Amino acid sequence: MSTIQYVTQETLEQMKAELQRMKGVDRPAASRAIAEAREKGDLKENAEYDAAKEAQGILEARIAALEGALANVRVLDASSIDTSKVSILTQVTLTNLKTNKQVVYKVVSEKEADLKSGKISVTSPIGKGILGKKVGETAEVQAPAGVLNFRIDAISA
């Protein structure tokens, strides 16, 4: 059984567009590559044919995985987010108590996480550590570099 994956409407649209591209553009291109390789003769020793079939198999697996993910997606409505505590889709201002450095993260689903954009997964070590915390509370986070302590300074939608 697949787990429910929470995403924003924007991510849902991106997933649908990717699936449409794979089915409408990539799948026909893979079929053409197989047909072209087949025309080159004996299939027993045709490396081009083998490579094209393998690429098609990988593409079909990606399509199936994305279809499965889409079947288990639930769209989150940012307007109904409770900002009294840290939850998915909240923006959180944290202070690292050791370095006194302040950082701002948006807590998002695994699919949307992008640390360079300041988006952390709800299932990441920091995401897990701050989830459910309120402004003024501290969170102890088990990170690969050791234990980090953060103070929750602000929460917004």
Image (tube, helix red, strand yellow):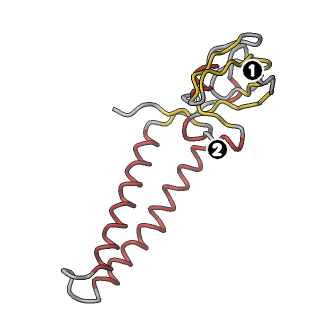
Compute the Cα span from label 1 to label 2: 36 Å
Q: Nearer the viewer, residue 151 or 71?
A: 151
Type of the residue with mark 2: Glu
Residue depicted at 41% across the width and 71% down the height: 28
Q: Is residue 57 left or right of residue 92?
A: left
Q: Nearer the viewer, residue 134 or 149?
A: 149
Pointer 1: what residue?
Answer: 98
Query: Which tag, 1 or 2, sits closer to the chain's start?
Result: 2
Q: In which quadrant of the rendered image does the C terminus lie?
A: top right
Q: Nearer the viewer, residue 13 or 105?
A: 105
Residue 155 screen position, x and y as percent: 76, 21
Q: In which quadrant of the rendered image does the N terminus lie?
A: top left
Quarter holding residue 106: top right
Mark 1, secondary structure of its residue: loop
Tell me whether the residue at label 1 lies in contact with that at label 2, contact meaning CB atoms closer than 8 angstroms: no
Circle 1 or circle 2, nearest the eye: 1
Residue 91 screen position, x and y as percent: 73, 28
Pointer 2: what residue?
Answer: 10
Residue depicted at 62% across the width and 33% down the height: 108
